[in-house]
Image (cartoon, rainbow, N blue to C red):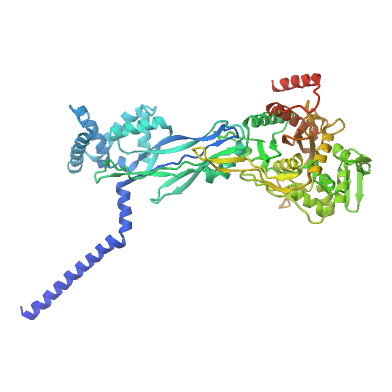
Amino acid sequence: MTTKGFQIRSFAMTSVLVGMLSVLSGRLIQVQFLDRKHYKEKAARTFDHPETLSGLRGKIVDRNEEVLAKSMPVTSITVDINHMRDVKVMSSTVAYERVSSMEGWDQLDAVKRRARVAAERYDIVDLATNHPESLSPEHVCEMGIERAVNVLARPLGMRREELMEKIKKGLGDRKTGEFELVADLPDDVASGLREMVDQQWIEGFHFKGSFKRWYSSPDLASHVVGYTGEKEEKDADGRTTYTQVGKFGVEAALDEYLEGKDGWRRYKRDMWGMKIPGDSDCLSPPKAGLNVQLTLDMAVQSIAEEELDAGLKEFVATKGCVIVMDPKTGEILAMASRPTFNLNRLDNLVEGGRNFATQAMYEPGSTIKIVATSGALNEGLVSPQTSIFCHNGHYSDGVVSVSDEHPQGMLTFEGVLEKSNNIGTYMIARQLGMKRFYDYVGAYGYGQKTGVSLSGESSGRVRNKGNPVDFSRAAYGYAVAVTPLQVATAFSAIASDGQRRKPHIVKSIIANDGTVVEDYAPEVVCRVIKPETAKEMRYALTKVTGEGGTAKAARVQGFEVAGKTGTARRMNDAPPKIVNGHRVKSGGYQEGHYTVSFAGMMPAENPSFVCVVVIDDPRAPQLAHLYGGPIAGAVFSRVATRLAEHMNLTPTEPVNSKLAEVDKKSERSRHQ
């Protein structure tokens, strides 16, 4: 070989070698620097085992700090399928069983015990790997599972056969991942099991702590308190996680305050799959959520719910509500809606999941007559004693036609409210004028959400298209749709000083150390009428519950009650029909079907509360007419009588002892 040929071959070989080393160096640079994060995360997934530590969700309490909702710590146990089929992992359990029965085990300290288990484990893995004919990897895994079943079955309250069958079924259903073995274990039971698993080197089981929402009075204020559910998410490793979130009511509306922040704990395993102790720095503690205090008084809530149920039963109805408010603050003391559901079982959600008090829209009937009457009084167009001609039961002017079932001639302003006369109310509304009338409708809060901290509130419906027919009908409670809470808010303006206050259900947000994070003070939205107008309206509304009024059934012994009845025909809510292949809505009103209501305040001169009762579609065969007075007014009377005692109100009127005794006997028989 010539010198030149040798040089060429040497150069070629050197070039190839340099090229290969350059490629290797480039790959090392890529792994060490460019792809460092990727391989670090991959290694972490192999040797790091994270555990989510759920943050405690805040409590919900009433105004007297009675707990309504709290989270109870529970634990679920999952089976790691990959571990159950990995001889390196499951050999730990087998090794512990063998060495722990050897002589002198009790005298060993923790370090020596660990070394003894590790040595035995190494021998088991070596034998299973290199001499499977003597001890197969499958047999090691089976022994590990059997050992786990023998230890855990009794503490879990299961038979060994039952637990083994459950594990084998889970392993047979899936090839990788995890499956849930036990859910919602009490925290004390789970702590004992976790300690047992750690002490006896049982592998393949993961403990996942969480919280289960528990409601102390699950049948009270269900629509207000609301409930939680699980939101499914994917973590950084692609695993499915579940977070507890509010789904309805205060639970949903105040979720950002109530929700806790999850933490995590991470432990490491060595290349043999054994846990590495002392990794205390890999911990991020969870943070508890804030507590929510409501304005509800659960004693008042119980009264409202009991009387609503009794009223629905007596008057043969299934839907309705009772709202009790403090008119001077806008605080809601009670809100009961039917149908309802149990917060712990979450049954009947399809039928009972709607909050009638905030989500039901209905034509209010005569309760809305306070708008035209108070507006005209406030503008100085009428006085309490102004005479109004009511056209003897029928009025017609062009396209506008108004009638009344109880014909009247001349009535005073107060008499129009006392008799709930449609024509008289429209005559007053005409003096006020269409524009100012609808301005007052808006000022009272109709046609807009109240802003209460509850999910799913309806805004009602008010339309002002300059149509004189709509205007005439709106004056006495048709051609508009309201919610019961809007009615309670409007009457609260009259009950206080003429100012409309924002109704609120949340009193404060409180940290776990008792610090008030946020305080919800009373909020005035606007002034609707003057204080003197509000006072005159309260007096005029006492005529409604007087001897000649439409709501004698709403009276309360020892107190003067101011209020207004409402009776409105129900819209036809039948499903659409198919006519000649076309979908036709079922319009008009249902003959003989009504929504009846009563909105009252007591004591009339200086009300301590406003109470609104709405009963939808009562059948009441014992009554000749389905009016708001004898139905909703009667329920109001029973609620108000019990509230007077609960609030320790001083009577403002002489008490007729004989009538009071009759009322007590009637009350006792009704609840028997």
Q: How many marks?
A: 0
Where's residue 334, x and y in %?
66, 35
The answer to whether residue 294 of the structure is visible from this angle is yes
Viewer-proximal residue, 380 or 311? 380
Image quadrant containing the N terminus: bottom left
Residue 443 location (% of width, % of height): 75, 49
The C terminus: image quadrant: top right
Residue appearing at x 81%, y 43% in the figure: 533
Q: Quadrant of residue 286?
A: top left
**Vertical placement of 210 versus 460: above or below?**
above
- Name the side, left or right, on which 113 lies relative to 320: left
Q: Quadrant of residue 370?
A: top right
* Image quadrant assignment for residue 667: top right
Where 110 sits versus 660, above or below?
A: below
Q: Along the line of sight, which residue is nearer the eye, 62 or 459?
A: 62
- Estimate the x, y position of residue 486 in percent, counting from the top left: 71, 44
Q: Is residue 175 visible?
A: no
Observer-nearest residue: 128 or 538? 538
Query: Residue 72: percent from the left, percent from the top?
Result: 47, 34
